[in-house]
Amino acid sequence: MTLAAQVYAADPAAPGVGGAPVEATGAMAFQVNDDSTTLAVAKVPQIYLYGPIDADAANRFDALLKSGKIRRGSDIYLNSPGGDMAAGLALGRLFRSYSLGTHLGVPRRTSRMPAMPRAAQCANACAYAYLGGLYRWAPSGNDRLGVPPHDAAAATGPGSVTPTELTSYLKDMDIRADLLAPPPTAPGEEVAWLDSERVLATGLANNGYLATTATYRPMAAETSLLLSQMSRDGEHRITLLCRPEGMTLTAQYVIGTERSRKIAARVTRSYFEIDQQPTPQQETGNVSMVDQSLVFSHPVPVDELNRLLSARTMGAWLADRGGAVRYGFLLSLAGVQNHLREYSASCQQIAKAGAGASTAAAQAPRH
């Protein structure tokens, strides 16, 4: 099957909509893949940016965004040795502004394109553009991400920027500058090639999941903690509600009306996990559809808070009849431990007060 691919390359006569091959212009080209087959498999358009980042690359890309030829939420695949650093930062800001995801990858071969290596490289200005992706996937296979030292990136090359501008960009992208330091095994190198493990461990890539956030609501009679995470496929929420009679976990899996309906028809069991170990209570037939979400709740012993305080992950899952297929999500608890400790202390007090009230009621004389 032949898939449609529209290529936009630099053309002095028509900036942003030219047809000149990239090797003839020495400038970055854009390949837009939004055919029905791509959308059926990937769910979103796939946009390939390849070749050196020239000074006008961000302007041409912006024109395609504003014209609607590149849609908000598309996936961007990068293959570039770098180039103009100011243009690279401008591309990154456009990626973030339009909620675009970034990957490494080579474009689909068309009849007008020369042969090129099948492994993608994204280095220097390209690496900084990559960091602008709202969702950033780690390199796979032989693809490589190359980051120059922070001071060198700001000081050298075409379209150079000041260290202050570079630091400001990283802050706006919520990336710590120290994470771009070369690993100990590559001191003094012009470019540090980062493997997938390091990119994920440092948060330079998130593989489609934003950091978990927490909203703590303490009250006298009850307390709650909402854990929420935005991901490429929707929003994931777990609410921990503590009352004198006990604790309840409620999961909300926001994935759209149609997908929620299909999954609800298949599943027979729901459960929660702490560090990939199920909590004691599992339920059948308690899943409901609310707006564009699947929602289920379980009572959980307050003692489970002891496990939760030292846990790294918390999951909410729905399983089919045989248990071979499950749907749901896993939340990272990194960054929300302080909220968990505050919630736990409050919940323990509420549970203790509730137990005391129950004991007093049981011991009260009956007339």
Image: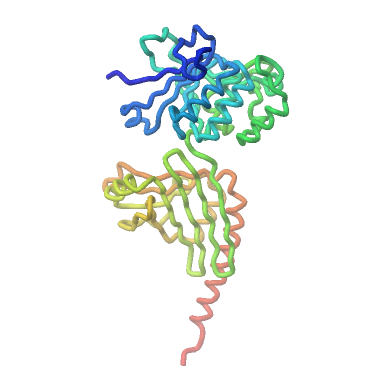
Pick the residue in front: 290 or 4.
4
| Residue placed most toward the observer, 290 or 197 | 290
Compare residues 292 and 265 and report the one nearer the observer.
292
Q: Is residue 355 above or below residue 211?
A: below
x, y (%) of residue 303? 51, 59
Identified at 48% across, 47% down, the residue is 314
Compared with residue 319, is residue 3 higher up or lower down, i.e. above or below?
A: above
Task: Name the image colouring.
Answer: rainbow
Task: Answer left or right for 176 relative to 46.
Answer: right
Residue at image x 61%, y 19%?
A: 124
> Split into 4 quadrants, where in the image is the N terminus?
top left
Q: Residue at x 53, y 52 (%)?
A: 308
Q: Position of residue 336 (x, y in %)?
A: 58, 48
The x and y percentages for residue 131 are 57, 29
**Residue farthest to the front?**
13
Q: Residue at x 54, y 23 (%)?
A: 195
Residue 140 in percent (x, y) is at 46, 23
Residue 41 relative to residue 49: left or right: left
